[in-house]
C-alpha cells in the first residue's frame, strides 16, 4: 500500500502530465507521429551517453558503435522473422559487450587520448563496412508485424487512460498540499486549463479510435489500417523505450553502483585507495551505457527501416554528446531534454537544407554540413551562457526564480 501511495505523490504530477501530453500529441497532428519518434531515439541515445560521461566521467567519442551494432543486429534478426521485442534484447546485450571491448584500452590510455581512440575505432568500423563491400551495404526491414497490429492501439488507449487518471489524482493532491491561497488559486487555474486540453485530446483520441475500429469491422482495406496504426505504434514504442530506460537509468544511478560511478568521476585515485576497482567499474559503466545505446539503435530500426553504415558515423555520437551537454551532464532529465532539442533541430535543419540550395549562397557540400554547423553554434552558446546545461542550470540557480515567483503570490 505504501508503494502505491508513492506513485500518487504530488511531485509526480509533472511527470505524469508530460507523458499524457506526449501520448496525446500525435492524435492532434498525425504528421507528428512520424517525426517525433526519431527525436525520442536521440533523447535515449543522449541518456545512455550521460552514463559514461556524466556519471562515470569517461570521455568517449565512439558512442555511435553500440548504437550502430544494435541497429544492424535488430535489422538482420527482423529479416529472419524474429519478433521485434525478442530481437531488441540480444541486440542490446551484444552492443553492451562491444562497448566493453572499446573500453578495454582505457586501462592504458586515459582522458582525451582515450576519447580520440574511440573516435578512431568508430570511424574504422564504418570505413571497413563501406569499403569491404562491393555495393552499398544496407539492410531493409520493411513492415514490422508488431507495429501493424491492433493490439498496439488498445495498449495505447489503455496507457493514455492510466496516465490521464494519474495526472488528475496527483494534480489534485498537489493543489491540496499547497498552503498559500494565491498559489492554490493559480495552480487550480493552470491545472484546470491543462485538463480542459487533455479532455479535448481524450475526446479526439477515443472518437477517432472508435470510428477507425468500426471501419475495420466493416472491412477497411489493409493499407488504410496500416497507415493509421503503424505510425502510432512506432510512436508508442519509442516513447515507452525512452520512459522505461529513464526509470532504469535513474534506478541504477541512485543505487550503490551509481554512487561508485560518481565517486570515481570525482576522484578516481581516492576511489582506488578506498578499495574500489576503478577499471572494473568503468567497464560496467560502458556495458550499461552500451545496452541503452543498443536499445536506442533497435528503436531506430522501427523509425528508419533501412539501415546503412552511416549509423556508425560520428554525427550520432555528436548528437548524443550535444544532447547530454545541452540538457545538463550528471542529471537525469537534462540529457533527455537536450537530446530531444538536438534531434529536433538536426532533423528540421536537414529538411530545410534543400530549400537553401536555391539561394545560391553556399555550395552543396557546405549545405550538407549546415545542420552540424548550427548545432555546434548552439552548443557553444549554451556552454558559454549555461555552463551546467539547460536543466542543470535550472537545478542550481532556478530556486532563486522560484522564490521570486513565490514571493509575488
Image (spheres, grey):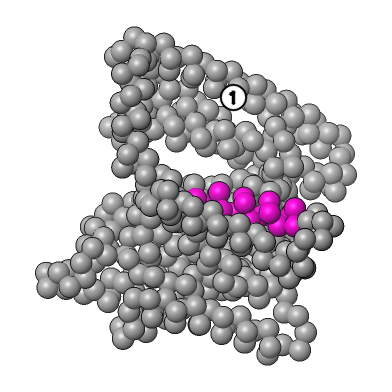
The vertical placement of 73 against 353, above or below, is below
Query: Which residue is rendered at x = 62% and y = 87% of the image?
Result: 128
* Residue 301, horizontal then vertical, whole percent: 65, 62
Which region is colored magenta? 338-353
Between residue 12 and residue 60, name the one nearer to us.
Answer: 60
Q: Tell whether position 134 is magenta.
A: no
User: Residue 294, percent across and down?
Assistant: 52, 66
Residue 299 as seen in the image, left or right of residue 119: right
Predominant SS along the magenta part: helix
Using residue 34 as the reference point, say whether residue 64 is left or right of it.
left
Residue 348 is one of the magenta-drawn residues: yes
Instruction: Tell me if I can see residue 205 in this picture.
Output: yes
Judge whether 303 appears above or below 4 on screen. below
Residue at the image point whose x is 34% and y is 28% from the top: 402
Give the residue number, with chain letter if any, for mark 1.
198
- x and y, in percent, of residue 398 in the image: 35, 36
Q: Residue furthest left?
A: 274
- Is residue 78 in view from this perspective? no
Label 1 crowd (10 A; few <14 / some 14-19 / many >=20): some
Q: Is residue 279 above or below residue 212?
A: below
- Choose top left, top right, bottom left or bottom right for residue 202: top right
- At x 49%, y 47%, the residue is 337
Residue 207 falls in image quadrant: top right
The one nearer the camera, 216 or 338, is 338
The residue sitting at 65% across, 72% down in the picture is 310
Horizontal arrangement in the rendering, residue 133 relative to residue 262 (left or right) = right
Amino acid at each position: 500500500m505504501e508503494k502505491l501511495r508513492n506513485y500518487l505523490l504530488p511531485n509526480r504530477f509533472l511527470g505524469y502530465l508530460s507523458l499524457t501530453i506526449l501520448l496525446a500529441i500525435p492524435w492532434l497532428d498525425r504528421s507528428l507521429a512520424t517525426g517525433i519518434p526519431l527525436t525520442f531515439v536521440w533523447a535515449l541515445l543522449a541518456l545512455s551517453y550521460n552514463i559514461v560521461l556524466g556519471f562515470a566521467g569517461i570521455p568517449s567519442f565512439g558512442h555511435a558503435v553500440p548504437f550502430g551494432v544494435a541497429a544492424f543486429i535488430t535489422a538482420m534478426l527482423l529479416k529472419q522473422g524474429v519478433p521485434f521485442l525478442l530481437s531488441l534484447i540480444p541486440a542490446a546485450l551484444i552492443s553492451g559487450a562491444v562497448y566493453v571491448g572499446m573500453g578495454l584500452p582505457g586501462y592504458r590510455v586515459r582522458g582525451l587520448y582515450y576519447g580520440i581512440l574511440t573516435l578512431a575505432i568508430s570511424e574504422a568500423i564504418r570505413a571497413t563496412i563501406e569499403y569491404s563491400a562491393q555495393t552499398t551495404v544496407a539492410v531493409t526491414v520493411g513492415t514490422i508485424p508488431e507495429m501493424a497490429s491492433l493490439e498496439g492501439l488498445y495498449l495505447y488507449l489503455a496507457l493514455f487512460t492510466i496516465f490521464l487518471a494519474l495526472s488528475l489524482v496527483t494534480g489534485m493532491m498537489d493543489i491540496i498540499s499547497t498552503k498559500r491561497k494565491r498559489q492554490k488559486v493559480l495552480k487550480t487555474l493552470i491545472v484546470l486549463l491543462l485538463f480542459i486540453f487533455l479532455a479535448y485530446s481524450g475526446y479526439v483520441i477515443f472518437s477517432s479510435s472508435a470510428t477507425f475500429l468500426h471501419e475495420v469491422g466493416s472491412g477497411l482495406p489493409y493499407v488504410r489500417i496500416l497507415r493509421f496504426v503503424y505510425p502510432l505504434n512506432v510512436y508508442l514504442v519509442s516513447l515507452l523505450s525512452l520512459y522505461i530506460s529513464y526509470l532504469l537509468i535513474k534506478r541504477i544511478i541512485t543505487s550503490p553502483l551509481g554512487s561508485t560511478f560518481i565517486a570515481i568521476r570525482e576522484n578516481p585515485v581516492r576511489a582506488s585507495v578506498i578499495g574500489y576497482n576503478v577499471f572494473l567499474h568503468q567497464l560496467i559503466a560502458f556495458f550499461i551505457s552500451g545496452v541503452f545505446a543498443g536499445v536506442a539503435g533497435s528503436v531506430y530500426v522501427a523509425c528508419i527501416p533501412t539501415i546503412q553504415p552511416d549509423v556508425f558515423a560520428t554525427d550520432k555520437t555528436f548528437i548524443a554528446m550535444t544532447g547530454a551537454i545541452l540538457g545538463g551532464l550528471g542529471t537525469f532529465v537534462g540529457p533527455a531534454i537536450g537530446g530531444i532539442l538536438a534531434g529536433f533541430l538536426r532533423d528540421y535543419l536537414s529538411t530545410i537544407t534543400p530549400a537553401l540550395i536555391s539561394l545560391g549562397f553556399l555550395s552543396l557540400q557546405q549545405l550538407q554540413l549546415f545542420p552540424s554547423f548550427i548545432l555546434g553554434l548552439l552548443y557553444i552558446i549554451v556552454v558559454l551562457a549555461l555552463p551546467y546545461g539547460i536543466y542543470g542550470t535550472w537545478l542550481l540557480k532556478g530556486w532563486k526564480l522560484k522564490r521570486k515567483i513565490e514571493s509575488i503570490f
